[in-house]
């Protein structure tokens, strides 16, 4: 037995030494495979003994790989390549209606960005609890819900049927951020005793906010006992009305709609002076200080 093993090893070693180097071979041999238009990969064309083994494709001639025919009766009712736009913080519903799905077939949701398998059939596999599939037998619908949608959820999702090969429809999810804006911001000057209307409008929203909170500094004023303050809601906007303003009403007002970036305005309640006069006064002060600094610098320079 032992001698047989030794002999085999010896023969192998001899073969390795006797066989010309693979790189040399590769340069000499490959004329004909190249002419057939097949990519020449020398390392795979030699077996362990270093002998030339042609690719079976070359012996059989050129052929096209056959795409296996997809045998399924199922068909998608949901349109392909659709785009859904939702606002940050709301729920996105990605529909997928497939008719005549066979017993052995399943409908899954896949996130393309990272090939994450989110759902299979009526089961949700994602660790992210915001994802959930609802299956309606009557509608033959597997809708994927993404709650509290975030900008990072944006991208392509595929609803895939497990046929061979698989087939799916694609949905692109856009997640946009709604932004609040207060008209006439960021500073507003008003006279003591006048009425102030602060109008907050919402930009880029897909659904009107369920609420809009107004804050004076840190204090919410929507349900304030102060009878001079009223919040008037309208579609896509909200107005804060303050009647007979006093110095105490000065300060920072913030409009915070649900699921939107808030906006702030600084309210200055003044008596007598016009805001323009106030601004001029402060500008003169700056000029005066600047002149003083200039004079002292010149004095210092002359002293040198
Ligand atoms: C949907 O469109 C993609 C290309 O965007 C295609 O690959 C896929 O086969 C289409 N799905 C169906 C069901 O037609
Ligand atoms: C006003 O208040 C909001 C919320 O507290 C804050 O984000 C903002 O920086 C404040 N603005 C000013 C001018 O103080």
Image (cartoon, rainbow, N blue to C red):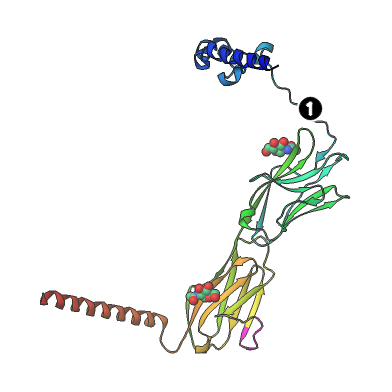
User: What residue do we see at 61% from left, 12% from top?
Assistant: 11
Which of the two residues, 220 or 109, is positioned nearer the viewer here? 109
Q: Is residue 262 in the magenta section?
A: no
Question: Quarter of the image holding residue 201?
Answer: bottom right
Q: Would you say residue 236 is visible in this rendering?
A: yes
The vertical placement of 132 against 243, above or below, is above
Residue 15 locus on image (x, y percent):
58, 12
Q: Is residue 105 left or right of residue 186?
A: right
What residue span does the magenta drawing correspond to? 222-229
Q: Could you say which quadrant of the image residue 6 lies in?
A: top right
Q: Main secondary structure of the magenta part?
A: loop
Q: Which residue bears the numbered disc 1?
A: 69
Which percent across, then down, holds residue 133? 78, 53
Q: Secondary structure at mark 1?
A: loop
Q: Camera-side residue: 79 or 60?
A: 60
Q: Position of residue 268 (x, y in %)?
A: 47, 82
**Looking at the image, which residue is at 85% across and 35% down?**
73
**Residue sitting at x 33%, y 78%:** 283
Quadrant for the C terminus in the image: bottom left
| Residue in the image at 67% along x and 57% along y | 86
Q: Quadrant of the N terminus?
A: top right
Image: 32 above or below 232: above
Relative to 144, residue 61 above or below: above
């Amino acid at each position: 037995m032992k001698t047989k093993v030794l002999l085999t090893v010896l023969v192998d070693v001899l073969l390795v030494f006797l066989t010309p180097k693979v790189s040399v071979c590769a340069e000499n041999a490959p004329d004909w495979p190249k002419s057939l238009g097949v990519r020449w990969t020398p390392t795979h064309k030699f077996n362990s003994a270093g002998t030339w083994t042609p690719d079976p494709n070359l012996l059989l001639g050129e052929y096209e790989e056959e795409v296996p025919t997809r045998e399924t009766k199922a068909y998608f009712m949901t349109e392909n390549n659709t785009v859904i736009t939702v606002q940050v913080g709301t729920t996105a519903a990605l529909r997928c209606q497939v008719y005549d799905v066979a017993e052995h077939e399943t409908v899954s949701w896949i996130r393309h960005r990272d090939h994450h398998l989110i759902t299979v059939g009526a089961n949700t596999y994602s660790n992210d609890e915001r994802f959930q599939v609802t299956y309606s037998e009557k509608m033959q619908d597997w809708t994927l819900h993404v709650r509290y949608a975030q900008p990072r959820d944006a991208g392509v999702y595929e609803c895939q049927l497990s046929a061979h090969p698989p087939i799916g429809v694609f949905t692109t999810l856009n997640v946009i951020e709604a932004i609040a804006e207060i008209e006439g911001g960021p500073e507003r000057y008003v006279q003591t005793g006048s009425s102030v209307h602060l109008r907050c409008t919402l930009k880029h929203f897909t659904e009107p906010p369920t609420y809009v909170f107004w804050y004076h500094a840190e204090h919410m004023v929507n349900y304030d006992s102060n009878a001079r303050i009223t919040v008037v809601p309208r579609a896509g906007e909200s107005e804060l009305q303050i009647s007979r303003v006093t110095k105490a009403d000065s300060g920072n007002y913030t409009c915070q709609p649900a699921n939107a970036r808030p906006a702030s305005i600084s309210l200055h309640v003044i008596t007598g002076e016009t805001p323009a006069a106030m601004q001029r006064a402060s500008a003169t002060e700056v000029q005066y200080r600047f002149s003083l600094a200039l004079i002292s610098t010149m004095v210092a320079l002359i002293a040198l």
